Image: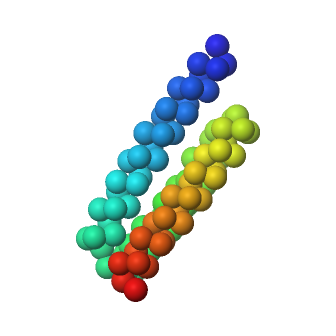
């Protein structure tokens, strides 16, 4: 039963990350640099709060790693577009 719960949490996390990536791509094309980086900072704060709500330490660490990758992608995306 715990495996089913973990799978459900993983699916929800995947959906959440997919939504975040879509938002990042849209923001990179529509926001100026200052507004974009402010939104990325808000995303990082939101990710921290979300991670604190996850009781499973393994799942929390997996998601932490995934969020780090997403935030790095967000920073690189805008830098490439403006650089």
Q: Residue at x 59, y 59 (%)?
A: 68
- Measured from the top left, where is residue 60 in percent x and y? 67, 43
**Camera-nearest residue between 35 and 17:** 17
- Asked if residue 82 is positioned above or below residue 47 in the image, the reply reads below
- Measured from the top left, where is residue 59 in percent x and y? 66, 38
Q: Residue at x 34, y 54 (%)?
A: 22
Task: Pick the quarter of the image with the N terminus.
Answer: top right
Q: Residue at x 35, y 78 (%)?
A: 81
Q: Residue 38: in sight, yes or no?
A: no
Residue 83 found in image quarter: bottom left
Residue found at the very far left of the displayed protein: 30
- Asked if residue 29 is positioned above or below residue 17 in the image, the reply reads below
Residue found at the very far top of the displayed protein: 1
Numbered disc total: 0
Residue 57 found in image quarter: top right
- Measured from the top left, where is residue 5 in percent x and y? 59, 22
Q: Residue 79: in sight, yes or no?
A: yes
Image side of residue 58 versus residue 8, left or right: right
Q: Residue at x 58, y 51 (%)?
A: 66
């Amino acid at each position: 039963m715990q495996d089913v719960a973990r799978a459900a949490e993983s699916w929800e996390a995947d959906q959440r990350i997919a939504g975040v990536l879509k938002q990042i791509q849209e923001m990179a094309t529509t926001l100026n640099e200052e507004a974009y980086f402010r939104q990325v900072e808000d995303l990082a704060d939101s990710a921290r709060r979300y991670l604190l709500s996850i009781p499973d330490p393994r799942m929390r660490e997996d998601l932490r790693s995934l969020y780090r990758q997403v935030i790095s992608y967000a920073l690189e995306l805008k830098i490439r577009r403006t650089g």
